[in-house]
Image (cartoon, helix red, strand yellow):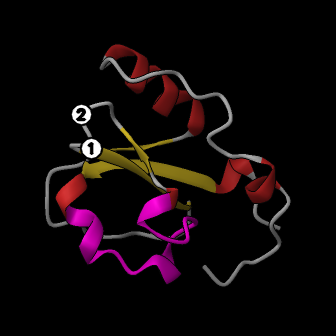
Amino acid sequence: MVNIENRRYVVIMSEEVSLLDFSKFLETSADTLIYNPERTLTVVKYLNEERYGFRYPTYGPFNVQELNEWKENNGWPFIDDIDGPEDSTSTDTSI
């Protein structure tokens, strides 16, 4: 079962979104990503066991608490439901 303890988050440049293979991440498309107010950065979540290379500079990896602390320190709105109900009950481990 996929749960919040198994997730890691990275912040990437928004221009890198078009390069993502969403079958390897816990989001389903660019529309499901969380962006900063300027839409220059976004958060991508994945399973802890996976490692991904990103073309542009990134921040992280973070667990959910570290991500929210980073976002607070960098002017992002705090989102306490980054792992909403549709994700917390997911049993798909193929991602």
Which quarter of the picture shows residue 21?
A: bottom left
Q: Mark 1 Cα within 10 Å, few/some/many (few <14, many 20+)? A: many
The answer to whether residue 73 is above or below residue 90 is: above
**Relative to residue 51, is residue 39 drawn left or right?**
left
Q: Is residue 20 magenta?
A: yes
Kindly identify the residue that appears in the image at 35 percent across and 70 percent down: 52
**Relative to residue 87, is residue 95 drawn left or right?**
left
Mark linked to residue 38: 2
Which quarter of the picture shows residue 71?
A: top left
Kindly identify the residue that appears in the image at 52 percent across and 51 percent down: 8
Residue nearest the observer in this picture, 52 or 91: 91
Q: What element carries label 1?
A: strand
Three-letter amino acid code at disc 1? Leu
Mark linked to residue 13: none
Three-letter amino acid code at disc 2? Glu
Residue nearest the observer in this picture, 95 or 48: 95
Tell me where residue 45 appears, x and y as whole percent: 51, 56
Residues in magenta, as a range: 16-31
Tell me where residue 95 appears, x and y as whole percent: 60, 79
Tell me where residue 29 appears, x and y as whole percent: 48, 70
Whole-number angstrom distance, CA of label 1 to CA of label 2: 8 Å
Q: What residue is disc 1 on?
A: 41
**Relative to residue 53, is residue 31 drawn left or right?**
right
Q: What element carries label 2?
A: loop
Q: Are marks 1 and 2 in contact (CB under 8 Å)?
A: yes
The answer to whether residue 48 is above or below residue 50 is: above
Tell me where residue 84 appears, x and y as whole percent: 73, 46
